[in-house]
Amino acid sequence: MNQNELLRVEELHISLQMDKGSLPVVNGISFGLKKGQILALVGESGCGKSVTSLSLMRLLGKGLEISGGQILFRHPESGDVTDIAALGSNDKAMRKLRGDQIAMIFQEPMSSFSPLHTIGEQIMEVVRLHRKVSKLDARKRAIELLDKVGIADPAQAVDRYPHEFSGGQRQRAMIARALACDPSVLVADEPTTALDVTIQAQILKLLKDLQQEMGMAIIFITHDLGLVAQMADEVAIMYMGNVVEHGATRAIFKQPQHPYTKRLLQAIPRLGVIQDKLQSIEGSVPNLFERPVGCAFNTRCTEQQRDACQQRLPALRAIEPLGLVAQQGTAAVVSNDVGVVNSSDVIHSVACHLIHTEAVA
Amino acid sequence: MSNLNASSTIKQNKASIQSEETGQTEARLKQQPENDHLLEIRNLEVAFPLSKKGMFRDNRRWLRAVDNVSLNIKRGETLGLVGESGSGKTTLGRAVLRLVEPTGGEVIYRTGKPNPSAKNSSGIDDTKEIDLRTVPMPEMRNFWRQMQMIFQDPYASLNPRMTVRDIIAEPLIVNGLAKGSDLNDKVMEIANICGLNTAWLSRYPHAFSGGQRQRIAIARALVMQPEFIVCDEPISALDVSIQAQILNLLKELQQSLKLTYLFIAHDLAAVAYAADRVAVMYVGQLMEVAPTESLYYQPRHPYTEALMSAIPNPDPDCEMAPVLLEGERPDPASPPPGCRFSTRCPYAVDRCKQSVPELQPVAQDHYVACHRVNELTLKGALELAG
Ligand SMILES: Nc1ncnc2c1ncn2[C@@H]1O[C@H](COP(=O)(O)OP(=O)(O)OP(=O)(O)O)[C@@H](O)[C@H]1O
Ligand SMILES: Nc1ncnc2c1ncn2[C@@H]1O[C@H](COP(=O)(O)OP(=O)(O)OP(=O)(O)O)[C@@H](O)[C@H]1O
Ligand code: SF4
Ligand code: SF4
Ligand SMILES: [Mg+2]
Ligand SMILES: [Mg+2]
């Protein structure tokens, strides 16, 4: 684990336990997260984004288990490192971390609040779980949080029930609850997928402000490449439970190296570009039961494949720096108040047999 | 076009015969040559009754999901329909096909092939006009051959207990249009066109991926050889890599089969790619209708500007500068008086809260409903990205 990392996921395996054995869902992924950084996990439905993020909180659903690897978390104050993967999901240490140091915004805003309690009660509950404060102080904190996420008239809103909120307000309230204890890591699983673009824009601004003002690190999960380009400092592209490419956002968008990343970027409609036909990726993601042998993308990859593509899973390995063209006007260095992210520091890695030819013996 | 029942109101279409009693907006909309309009939606209204909590009957509140909408759909075009969730897009699409019953207005459907030689001279051709709202419900079936709908959710819209072959064949069987080997040929042909492997026709939908299921749904809609299809969020539930396949397929089919689409979607970049013209809806009403290029790059309505500014650009060097809308979104059951966007519009003035701006032409094919349309200089999608 690097000194400046808050979180390091190392060779994480998650599998689905079934009668006849187990099925890999997340297949040995690794990534690190620094203070004040936004890392996007990108990939198509079923590639393991939600499962990965739930495992960081040890909230995996029934039948899913961490079957290998580490999730190292460095406590920002004490500097102590805890391996979350080695804890029981109900251990005291885990309950202390969850919601306090690591908090999450879930994919479905509807199901994440109980319909029976007011929004305020549900935020207060999180506050009081981790902080020894009076009910009144917890309520004050809840109002303050609702105000922070831009809910109008927070003193009134605190007593409303989830169904009395619009979709966008509910999403803000969920962010407010996630922020209750000033987490150092926020996991945002498709935080805007259900929202309109105008409301999405507000939520994104809110997340960026929080990152910049509080130095919060965010794992941002999405399949929308436009959002990634706008939000993330670093990107990890996932396919069938593996990270196939990882790098600074500009490197991934300007000089993608993995065939899947390249095709994905070609497939999206772009404004201001005349496109007669979109370059689609033929076929579809195989289901978990039909995981291809070798590279998982080999059923759709149109590159001149090597024998190894059908035989071995390519490892994610660093490539030579590409000498990225500097962005016009501004430097390619992203800096902010917490001053941690420097995109030129980020190693660009790819998992493809074509790129790491020396591995083919 | 043989099965139209005589009891329906069928008018011979002569450009010269036009009803005089129609409203202002409509009169303006009609200035264009009419022959290329497959559909003319006039002052359409769809109101849903709300709770019956009140003691008296007239306490009953109505939600006007579609409120006085006039819109033309040209033969062979893709008309995009965008706007925020709950603005009435689906309801409008369904009301055109009478899958939900409109409570006011007209849906004029011009059937038959226009006669090109008549187009420039007297304006008389072979087409017939019919107000779909006057068609008795049992006869709507005849129209649903030509007008189909594709839904957002390819999982929910296919019967899990039918094979793919039966799903595609069902509309033909129900309408008694084909049987035996002819039926089989038709199903095979359409499956081929839609890129479905014909060896898989005896499988059930669960064995297919989302993109393949959407292809099945499209095949089912096309087997009737419709001329008009309402595509309601046809790609929203699909993976990014599959969306491109379906967008391409819809485009190819449109060209080869001369289809007309009403394309409802919230992905504005996809709409820009797919649509010839775009209509923007807000709380049940149209704010702006324009050719795609103008709408995206020279919007004239403040709500369109806000929408365009919020499109996340997949280029990290183009930083977004979204117009952030403050203020509450109106409750569709009790919209604000005046302009519906006035509670959030950054340019609102007093007059906006008093009278409803009418949809009026500002340029060729470009309609805007804003009191300040001539005073404002708005930014388009790319300018905002800087
Ligand atoms: N509780 C569960 N039981 C069984 N399988 C599961 C469970 N949760 C997820 N899976 C499976 O694990 C795989 C990864 O799912 P995950 O939810 O992480 O995907 P995702 O990348 O978040 O996709 P999406 O974009 O659709 O949210 C999928 O194949 C999914 O079907
Ligand atoms: N059957 C119904 N009964 C009562 N109200 C309805 C009904 N169908 C739709 N509505 C209401 O009408 C309004 C318009 O809904 P509609 O589904 O047309 O919106 P939409 O623009 O398609 O939204 P989305 O983008 O979320 O699909 C909403 O306020 C909705 O709640
Ligand atoms: S490893 Fe082989 S199959 Fe996989 S992406 Fe690279 S070239 Fe394609
Ligand atoms: S009429 Fe007024 S409130 Fe409505 S869009 Fe125009 S400027 Fe804004
Ligand atoms: Mg998910
Ligand atoms: Mg809809």
Image: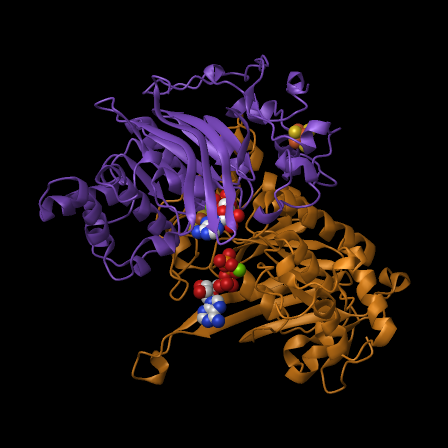
Chain colours: A purple, B orange
Which residue occupies 57% across, 26% down? Answer: A315
Quarter of the rendering occupied by the C terminus of chain A: top right
* Any part of residue B215 in sight: yes
The structure residue drawn at horizontal position 57% and vertical position 59%, both measured from the top left corner, is B153
Seen in the image, is A289 located left or right of residue A75?
right
Which of the 4 image quadrants contains residue A272? top right
Instruction: Say above or below: A327 vs B193.
Output: above
Name the outermost residue toward the right.
Answer: B117
Identify the residue at image location x=57%, y=69%. B44
Tell me if B11 is positioned left or right of A268 in this view: right
Residue A191 visible: no
B176 over A299 or under it: above or below: below
Residue B379, above or below A321: below
Q: Quadrant of the N terminus of chain A?
A: top left
Residue B91 rendering spot, x and y as whole percentages: 54, 66
From the top left corner, tell me how far across and down residue A270 is, in percent. 63, 37
Q: Is residue A266 left or right of residue A68?
A: right
Looking at the image, which is closer to me, A346 or A294?
Answer: A294
Q: Position of residue A133 (x, y in %)?
A: 10, 42
How many numbered circles does the render carry? 0
Residue reaching furthest front?
A: A20
The vertical placement of A158 against B383, above or below, is: below
